[in-house]
Image (cartoon, coloured by chain):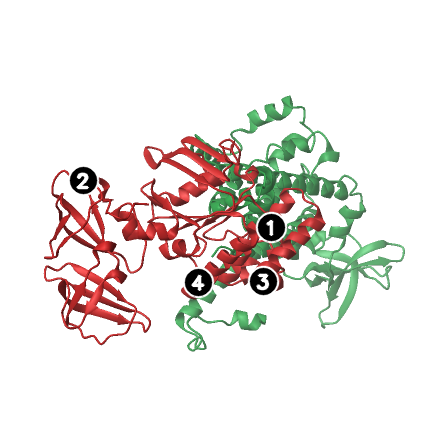
Chain colours: A red, B green
Amino acid sequence: MATHALELKHIKKSWGAVQVIHGIDLAIEEGEFVVFVGPSGCGKSTLLRLIAGLDDPTSGDILLQDKRVNNVPASERGLSMVFQSYALYPHMSVRSNLSFGLENLRMAKEEIDRRVNDAAKLLQIEMLLDRRPGQLSGGQRQRVAIGRAIVREPQIFLFDEPLSNLDAELRLQMRVEIANLHAELGNTMIYVTHDQVEAMTMANRIVVLRGGRIEQVGKPLDLYNRPVNKFVAGFLGAPQMNFLAGKIAPDGKLTMDCGLQMPVQLGETLVETMPCTLGLRPETIGVSLEGAGDMVVKVQNFEQLGAVTYIYTAFPNGETLTVQLAQQIPLKRGQEIGVTFDPERFHIFAGEGERALELKGRALA
Amino acid sequence: MGIATFLTRTRGSADKAERIGAADVMAYCYLALGVFIILVPVLWTFFSSVKPERAVDSFDTRLLPYAQVETDVPGEGDKTTWIYTDDNGNETVVFKAGPTRKETDVAPIDDPTNVFKVPRTQLAPNEEIRIATENYLDPILKRNGQTNFTFFTYLFNSVFVTVMATLITLLINAMAAFALSKYRFRGRLTFTILIVATLLIPSSIILVSLFFVVWSFGIFGSLWGVIIPAAATPTGVFLLRQYMLTIPDELLEAARMDAASEWRIFWRIVLPLSLPALSVLAILSVIWRWNDFLWPLIVLISDPSAHTLQIGLTTFSGEFDSDFHYILAMTVVSLIPITLVFVWLQRFITTGIATSGLK
C-alpha cells in the first residue's frame, strides 16, 4: 500500500446533537495542493481543524504517513497552519513570531536564525522582522503568518481561508505567491476556502464539500467539465452555470419549460420521462444578433469588459440565461437576440441529489 | 502636553473646544470636589505628621507646623519660651518660673534671676515654623526611647509579605483563570460561580476556621501564615478570567500548532497578553496585603520580630497614652511604597489595548 501524506477514514464529527461531518474518506498524496471548497457551514474548516488536531473527530481515523494520529495532540503532529485571522502573537516582534515554534522544539539558535532569515527572505519581510504585528499592514501580516508556517518545515501546510481578510488586489497577489511557494517548497498543502476562483486557480485537486459530505474530488478542470451533480456544477465557474428546468424522456428528448426542445444522446437508460435540470456553461452559448438560432431571448443587461462580454438575458417564461462571449458586439437593453446551444456540452441533472446523467461520448468524472 | 493645557481642556470638538460652557464648569467643580474629598485626609495626615508632639496633642488645626521655641536658660535647663506683651506694647521673651496661675511668675531668658509676675492673658507662646523631623527620625533611628518600634524589621516583614503574597496571588490566580476561561470541562461554570460566590462571605466570618487551618499546617506565627491563606482571591480569579476570555482562542491554537506545551502557552502567550489585568490585580493585591491588619495581627501577635508595619504602628498606642505624632509620621512612611507601586504599575493598565495584533 502506498504511503499517503494524509488519509482520512470515515471521519465523523458532531457538536452535541448536531452532526457536522458525515463520514469523510479522503487520501492526500505527498506534495499535493488540495483545496477544500464549499459554501459556509459545509464543514471544511472543521475538517481542517480535525486534521490539525485542534478538534477531535467523533469517530473515524486520521492517518499521517500511515500512522494513526487521533490521539496525538496538535502540538506534536508536525503540521503548521495559517489562520484566517493570522493569529499573530501581538506582543512579540515578527522575528519572535517566526521563531516561537522553533524555540518550542528546542532547536539550536543558529538553526532558528537561519530558518527565520530564509523564510523572511523568501517572503520579502526581512525589513519587518523587528516590528510588532500591530505595525504591519494586512498583506504583511499575511506574509508573517505564512512565514510562521514555513519555518517549521512541516509535513503539511494547512491554510484556513487565509486570504479572506485581504482586499481584491492583494488577494490576487497572495494567491499567486502561495501557488509559487508550493511550487518552490513542494510540501503538501491543504487549503480551505469558500472562493471557487481560489480553488480553481491554486489546486492540484479540489474537494467540494456540502453539508459535511464530499460532493466530488478531482482536478479543477475535471470538476469544471464533468461535475457529478448540480451543486458542484453550480459552485464552480463564474459566471455561474445556467440552469433551466424541464423534462427528459428515456429517448433523450429534452423538453424545457422555456420552450427549448432538443434531443441528446443519453449514455444510460431512463425508466420514464423525468423532471431534469439542463446546465449550460455561459461560454458554450452562441449568439446571433439577427435572431437566428435555437431560441430567441431578450437582453436584460450586459457588461462589456473588452476581452469578454457578459450578456444577461431572459426567456419569455422568465428563466434567465447568462451568456459569455469572448468578443465585443453591439448590444442594447431590451434587444432580442438568437442563441444557439451545443448539445455536446450540455449537463443534464436529474433524479436523486440532482446527479449528472451520463451522456454518450462523455464519461463522467 | 503641559499640565496647564491638560487642566484647561473643555468639552466638544476641536473647533468649539475653546469656549468654556456650563458643562465644563460643572465637570471641573465635580472633579475638584472629588479630588478634595480624596486628598484631604491624606494631606491632613501628612501636614500633621510634621507637627511637633505638643501641637498634635493639643489639636493645633493650623496648617503649618508651629513649634514653641525652647531655649537653654543658664542655670534652669531647657525652657519653653513665651512672649510677654506689657501694657505699653513692648514684647519680652520670657520663660515661666513657676506654675501657671492667674498671675504667673516669669523671668526673661537673658536675665533668669529677675522673676516678676504678669497676668496670664498677656503671655503668648513664642512660636517658630519648624518641621518636626523627630517624628520620623525617632522611631526609625530608635532615638528618644523609641526602642520598641523596630522600623526596618517591620518594613522588611511588610515588604516580604506583600511581595511574596502578590507574586503567589498573580501566579495561582492567573492559572485558575486560564483554566476557567480557556479550557472546556464539565463544571467549569459551576467552579467559576463557586469561586465568585466566596466574595459574599466576609473574611471575619471564616477567621476562626482559618486560624485552625493555619495552626494545623504549622505556619501559625510565621510570615507564611499571613501570605498563603490570602494568596487565592476570588476577585483576582474573576478579574483575570473575564480578561482572558477576550484573548482570541485562535492565538492559543496557533501556539499549539507551533508545538507549544500548555505551560508555554500560559507563560508566553496568555500571561503577557493579560498584563493590563495582571497590573490591576497586582495593585489591588499590594494594597490589600500592605494594609492588612487583622489577619497578620492574629497570626503574628506572639512574635514582635515578625510584625509588619501596620501591626508595628500599634506599639505607639498605649493603654493610657498614644503617640499620635509618631503614628502619623509612620503612617505617612507606610504610604510611600504603595504609592510608588501604583505609579509604576498603572502604566501597564492601558498598554494592552494598543498592542492588539489580530486583524
Q: Mark 4 points at which residue?
A: A172
Question: Residue at coordinates 47% horizontally, 39% vertically from top-left?
Answer: A51
Q: Earlier in the sequence, mark 2 or mark 3?
A: 3
Per the image, label 2 sits on a secondary structure element best described as loop
Residue A124, label in figure: 3
Q: Mark 4 lies on which chain?
A: A
Image: B355 above or below B234: below
Q: Which chain carries label 1?
A: A
Q: Earlier in the sequence, mark 4 or mark 1?
A: 1
- From the top left corner, tell me how far across and down residue A161 is, in percent: 43, 52
Question: Which is more toward the observer, B352 or A127?
Answer: A127
Per the image, label 4 sits on a secondary structure element best described as helix
Amino acid type, callout 4:
Leu
Q: Which of marks 2 and 1 is nearer the N terminus?
A: 1
Q: Mark 2 points at which residue?
A: A269
- From the top left corner, tell me how far across and down residue B168 is, in percent: 63, 38
Query: In the image as oriented, which residue stretches furthest toward the right?
Result: B75
Amino acid type, callout 2:
Thr
Structural distance between the alpha carbons of marks 2 and 3: 59 Å
Q: Name the residue under label 1.
A: A151
Within 10 Å of disc 3 (Cα), the crowding (few <14, some 14-19, many 20+) is some
Q: Mark 3 lies on which chain?
A: A
Structural distance between the alpha carbons of marks 1 and 3: 14 Å
Per the image, label 3 sits on a secondary structure element best described as loop
Within 10 Å of disc 4 (Cα), the crowding (few <14, some 14-19, many 20+) is some
Image: A306 above or below A248: below
Structural distance between the alpha carbons of marks 4 and 3: 17 Å
Structural distance between the alpha carbons of marks 4 and 2: 45 Å
